[in-house]
Image (cartoon, rainbow, N blue to C red):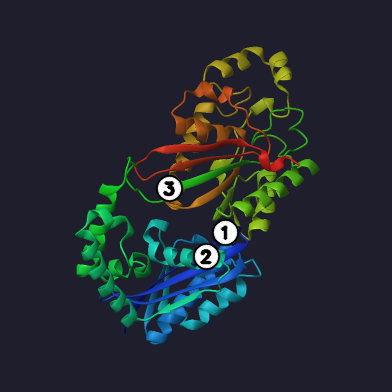
Amino acid sequence: MREFIVEADGGSRGNPGPAGYGSVVIDVATGETLAERAEYIGVATNNVAEYRGLVAGLRAAAELDPSASVHVRMDSKLVVEQMSGRWKIKHPDMKPLAMEAARVFPPDRVTYEWIPRERNKHADRLANEAMDAGAKGERWSASTSTAELQARASEGAASAAASSSASSSVSSSPGRASRRGAAESLGGGAAKADADVRAAQTVASSGWAPADMGAPATFVLLRHGETPLTPQKRFSGSGGTDPSLSEVGQEQARLVGEALARRGTVQEILASPLARTRQTAAAVADRLGLDVTVEDGLRETDFGAWEGLTFGEVRERYPDDLNRWLSDPDAEPTGGGESFAATATRIAATRDKLIATYAGRTVLLVTHVTPIKTFVRLALGAPPESLFRMELSAASLSAVAYYADGNASVRLFNDTSHLRP
């Protein structure tokens, strides 16, 4: 039985917005790229575009050999988990597409694997070419056969060889855009020629840049919307009454969803198990067409006997305990709450797990004040007392990117611009 690999991707610039997909069929035995598929599909969400890419890739494989077995590789965890049967398909736009994908090959001949985005560059490039065309008002699609790929690789090798002989013209090497990476896929002399061009361009470029470590895992940190306790500035952790969002908080969650839809970058949503975060996440997920995964590690600190009290009330009733808590990260709130040190240990473990799971992806983490401040503090390498020097508003957005070398970059903190009239 012949074996194929299908790599597929899709994207939307606006979510929903101008969208496109790309798919590649690879022969497992030879590593040869056998077919490419890409199309601009108009206005759609990221998830719909990713499913469209999957369907196109499976159909291309079936055209080559309907009796083959197929291993699908995608950087959409949602599609992979849903098509593998581990996650339910709830969104009405995706159910028919999933059914369509399932009909192309018998289920026992298709397997699914999630891969980081940096390992899905070929399909990602095709999807972006389709979206670029759409941005120009073009209804664009591409269907490429094996013979065309081989011809393109030969053309690319000749062009790259000519370009490498004159470094002064290397940055505008002819035919490079049209080759779309076929030389890399097919290997051999064409791949080496393309590598020479890339090396020459690096030498010729001015300035400096860090090594390309692929796309980082980016955590967009959203504090939940207001609850009745928020404007009163009362301690509200994981050991209290678990308040729900107020009307103000519900509107804030809606506005966050609109803002994130315009940005169109969030691919997954995780939330703390507490009611206020799950409600906030649900409102955003409904706007983005995504599901919410509950992550216990994102819960707020347990403030013990201080739950529901204002800072002034705690100072009046438990002055010694409060002073210790303010000066020692290992000190617990009165009544056996959670220390900041314990919270940091929990958040660090959660962070490491999520970085491994969502490498190369942008994930919205809907959580609370202390976890968000702790993510930022750890990323900056700041001391524990820095937690008291950060202001974090309800429904605010922060962001931290985590790279393959272990470094982190704080990209945003306490952004509330989406809440303004």
Q: Which residue is mark 3?
A: 216
Few, some or many C-alpha atoms within 10 Å of disc 2 (few <14, some 14-19, many ≥20)?
many
Based on the displayed image, in which of its 4 quarters is residue 188 positioned? bottom left
Question: Disc 2 marks which amino acid?
Answer: Met
Q: Which residue is mark 2?
A: 131
Give yes or no for contact between labels 3 and 2 (Cβ–Cβ under 8 Å): no
Q: Answer with left or right where residue 229 lies relative to residue 132.
A: right
Few, some or many C-alpha atoms within 10 Å of disc 3 (few <14, some 14-19, many ≥20)?
many
Element class at badge 1: loop
- Residue at position x 64%, y 66% from top? 91
Give yes or no for contact between labels 2 and 1 (Cβ–Cβ under 8 Å): yes
Residue 113 in sight: no
Q: Which residue is mark 1?
A: 13
In the image, which disc is placed on residue 198?
none
Q: Earlier in the sequence, mark 2 or mark 1?
A: 1
Residue 391 in sight: yes
Judge depth for marks 3 and 1 and give the one in front: 1
- Give the percent coordinates (x, y) of residue 377: 49, 30
Q: Answer with left or right where residue 102 lies relative to residue 407.
A: right
Q: CA distance from mark 2 to mark 1?
A: 8 Å
- Residue at position x 67%, y 39% from top? 417
Question: Which residue is farthest right?
Answer: 247
Position of the N terminus, as image quadrant, is: bottom left
Question: Disc 1 marks which amino acid?
Answer: Arg
